[in-house]
Image: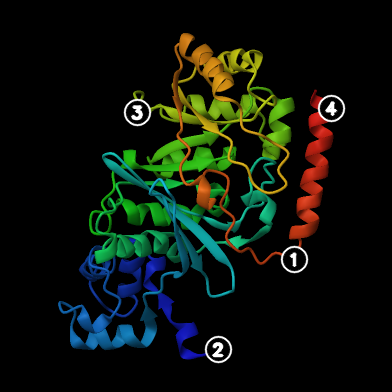
């Protein structure tokens, strides 16, 4: 192992982690704030430029630490202004990060894992296999890298990051510790200073981790529901076999008990003639009518060899009106970045998983069989 491999990556540390790091060689806690600002506010990675640190401390940092964010493999820009970065990791994997500029806001979609292990049948990421969890530094490093990119002269017309959604590659709650630490950095006033209302974690429904999450952080929560019955949801989101809808919704009902005005967002991908009928809309109303929630209808974004098609605008409109008539606040997500495969469910990166071919065949066969049985 060379010297660089032994160095700690300071992007892996939130403020408390940096305080422990500096305490380990006799420095005061305020050093954590200084270095946090240098790294995240100013984008400085060279310790010699951190001029409010002593010369001795800067030399120590050179010997034991570094600031290492994922490197850019390539960038794609959609016709609608959405920007996708493929970021290279040291082990040969690659992840994808997407920035969506909108009127009055700029949303960054951040990945938490290399690939995904949950096998959701409508999601391209799930069919890439699973390699590993991202480190805290690789998660917050996506934010760090994009902030630097958006500050470049040629990108000055782009908006800055106002919101972060943990909706990229992977299931965030299966990488709990690193994701929570990264979100703490996002919220730290000496780093990115984002409000709890402007960071959203999206989960497929890992119920025990959701129960822990509401105690550890108060960021916004989105739940990938996609069906109102266990029979259908087990086809679309197989983790439902472990944490069925009744158990999931019981957790959601009390998730924001301490802040009763806040609501859980339920995500519902619209799949033509699969989960978009009026009967299923009414079943969804029965599921959600007692919950403080809102629903986000997501037009399905196709990928190679998928079995699904997107619901027509007319079918989506009927579905939405049934929910709205029942008093459920319902939004419809715009398609963004689908021409560069940057839309919801299309992120794939480059996952070093030798099971990919067999995995894709397995998912396809299982889904075809399940959909036939569900007809």
Q: Which residue is mark 4?
A: 373
Nearer the viewer's eye, disc 1 or disc 3? 1
Query: What's the residue at 46%, 90% (across, down)?
Result: 3
Write down the residue under mark 2. 1
Label 4 packing within 10 angstroms: few (<14), some (14-19), many (20+): few
Of mark 3 and mark 4, the one earlier in the sequence is: 3
Q: CA distance from mark 2 to mark 1?
A: 26 Å
- Distance of label 3 from label 4 (alpha carbons): 42 Å
Label 4 with label 1: CB-CB less than 8 Å: no
Disc 2 or disc 1, which is closer to the eye?
1
Q: Is residue 59 left or right of residue 111?
A: left
Residue 214 percent coordinates (x, y): 44, 38
The x and y percentages for residue 348 are 59, 56
Q: Earlier in the sequence, mark 2 or mark 1?
A: 2
Circle nearer the viewer, 4 or 2: 4
| Quadrant in the rendering for residue 199 | top left
Query: Which quarter of the rendered picture does the C terminus lie within?
Result: top right
Mark 4 residue element: helix
User: How far apart are the two marked residues, 2 and 3, measured between alpha carbons?
Assistant: 49 Å
Would you place residue 65 above or below residue 284 in this image? Answer: below
Mark on residue 354? 1
Tell me the SS state at disc 1: loop
Mark 4–mark 2 Cα distance, whole angstroms, equals 54 Å
Residues 26 and 69: in front is 69
């Amino acid at each position: 192992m060379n010297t660089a491999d032994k160095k700690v990556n300071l992007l892996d540390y939130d403020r408390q982690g940096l305080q422990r790091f500096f305490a380990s060689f006799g420095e005061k806690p305020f050093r954590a704030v200084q270095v946090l600002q240098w790294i995240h506010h100013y984008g400085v990675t060279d310790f010699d430029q951190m001029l409010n640190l002593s010369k001795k401390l800067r030399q120590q940092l050179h010997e034991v630490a570094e600031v290492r964010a994922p490197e850019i493999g390539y960038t794609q820009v959609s016709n609608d202004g959405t920007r996708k970065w493929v970021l290279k990791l040291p082990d040969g994997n690659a992840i994808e990060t997407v920035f969506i500029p909108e009127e009055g806001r700029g949303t960054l979609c951040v990945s938490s894992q290399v690939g995904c292990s949950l096998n959701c049948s409508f999601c391209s990421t799930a069919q890439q296999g699973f390699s590993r969890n991202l480190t805290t530094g690789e998660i917050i490093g996506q934010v760090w890298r994009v902030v630097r990119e958006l500050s470049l002269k040629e990108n000055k017309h782009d908006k800055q990051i106002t919101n972060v959604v943990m909706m990229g590659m992977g299931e965030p709650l299966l990488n709990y510790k690193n994701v929570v630490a990264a979100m703490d950095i996002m919220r730290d006033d000496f780093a990115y200073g984002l409000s709890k209302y402007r960071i959203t974690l999206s989960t497929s429904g890992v119920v025990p981790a959701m129960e822990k999450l509401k105690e550890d952080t108060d960021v916004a929560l989105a739940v990938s529901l996609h069906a109102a019955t266990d029979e259908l949801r087990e086809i679309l989101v197989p983790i439902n076999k472990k944490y069925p809808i009744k158990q999931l919704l019981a957790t959601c009902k009390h998730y924001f008990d301490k802040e009763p005005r806040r609501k859980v967002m339920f995500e519902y991908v619209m799949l033509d003639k699969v989960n978009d009928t009026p009967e299923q809309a009414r079943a969804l109303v029965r599921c959600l009518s007692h919950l403080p929630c809102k629903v986000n209808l997501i037009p399905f974004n196709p990928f190679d060899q998928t079995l699904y098609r997107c619901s027509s605008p007319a079918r989506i409109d009927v579905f939405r009106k049934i929910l709205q008539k029942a008093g459920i606040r319902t939004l419809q997500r715009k398609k963004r970045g689908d021409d560069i495969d940057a839309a919801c469910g299309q992120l794939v990166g480059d996952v070093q998983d030798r099971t990919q071919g067999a995995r894709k065949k397995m998912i396809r066969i299982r889904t075809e069989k399940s959909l036939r049985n569900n007809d």
